[in-house]
Amino acid sequence: MKFSNLFTKTLKDAPTEETAVNAQLLIRGGFISKVMAGVYEYMPLGLRVLNKINSIIREEMNATGAQELFMSVFQNKEVWAKTGRWESAKEVMYQFKDEGGKDYGLGFTHEEPLTAAARHFINSYKDLPKAVYQIQTKFRNEARAKSGLLRGREFLMKDLYSFHVTEADLESYYEKVAQAYLRIFSRAGVPAIRTFASGGLFSKYSDEFQVVAPIGEDVVYVNEKENRAVNKEVYTDAVLADLGWKKDALVEKPAIEVGNIFKLGTRFSDALGLLYTNEAGAQHPVVMASYGIGPGRLMGTIVEVSSDERGIIWPEAIAPFKVHLIALEGVDDEGEKIYNELVEEHFEVLYDNRQDKTAGEKFADADLIGCPIRLVVSKKTLEKDSIELKRRNEKESTLVPRSDVARAL
């Protein structure tokens, strides 16, 4: 991609109302555009990052045996009323009436409609276990929409649901997903801590995946030896005793929740009549669990913990481009040649070919956008038959032979 062809432009300053680092840098870099509080649109650079995050999530979810589907965000009151959540979730669920006076809502999660749909396909113990997931836009009436992509009214969610005959089978798959979550966050560049927490509207307890960060709204107590934690909201002597932890072994830290998983039991299958017939011909409710990750929230979290005063430092696996190539004045032809060579070698390259920007402006934009590797070609480097290579997360640059650039990358 040539910088001159980008749909967006970089900004020297972020909107004054944005206080979160992720919002400031992502807007300045042209990754996202703000619509209103809690609502952002992904521009081409931002969508490249988001798609890479989603690809990692899909690979890991598929590896657990889950199948991808896509459900409607438009919600039927009758289905939600059966579990009581049409009323209990009113504070967070957008609800409205059509012209005929019928009630509808916008989904902030999909336990109810997915359970209702599963009644068509799950009838026998032979139909179980099953697991399905989607990556879909959700809506939440968030009274405190703030912190950029960390807390939104419209957001993307990967929500997975599993269906089982027994609690033991659920437990086995639950642990498989928990390990997949840890791999997802590690691959995306932000190792997360598995955290014992409240289940909120879903279950009594849950497992959260927390990333330690100053902006984090959660407080967790970390057992650094085991790389596990407990959320402050369930931080009691009884819980610590169940975990086998002592208070003096825990460290209090602020953190951002990037994922959560819930053992639902038969709460939703009981309410919505999702039953299976066992070998003896008796009917039993299906045992369920649900598992969520916010890809956009994860993107914002990565910026919060992987950035500096100059801009973003993207982990290579999710960077919009691996290489940011800069050609300084007088070497445009050589810059174009190098760009074409790298593209032919299948490298993802953002080539700053702009004629109206100074070297300093180009370097500043490279730091702001945060691609892992910056290549600079200039008269000075070409005199040495070399190109300057600098990694975004390192201070020093090196010269690599002009003929050896692809191998150096």
Image (cartoon, rainbow, N blue to C red):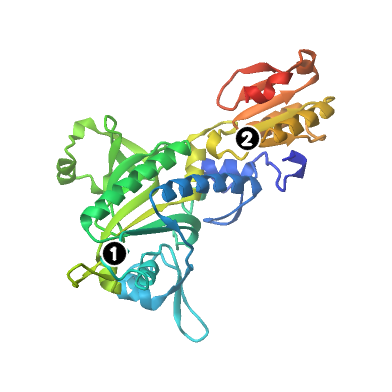
**Image quadrant for the N terminus?**
top right
Q: Quadrant of residue 90?
A: bottom left
Q: Find disc 2 in the rendering and name its residue.
A: 368
Judged left or right of residue 18, residue 270 is left
Packing grade of label 1 (10 A; few <14, some 14-19, many >=20) is: few
Which residue is at the far bottom? 100
SS label for mark 2: helix
Q: Is residue 82 above or below residue 262?
A: below
Judged left or right of residue 139, residue 200 is left
Q: Quadrant of residue 210?
A: top left
Nearer the observer, 30 or 374: 374
Q: Looking at the image, tell me whether mark 2 or mark 1 is earlier in sequence order.
A: 1
* Residue 158 percent across, percent down from the top left: 45, 54
Q: Quadrant of residue 393?
A: top right
Q: Is residue 293 above or below residue 186?
A: below
Which residue is at the far top? 384
Judged left or right of residue 312, residue 268 is left
Q: Is residue 144 visible?
A: no
Residue type indicated by callout 1: Lys
Tell me the number on the disc at residue 126. Answer: 1
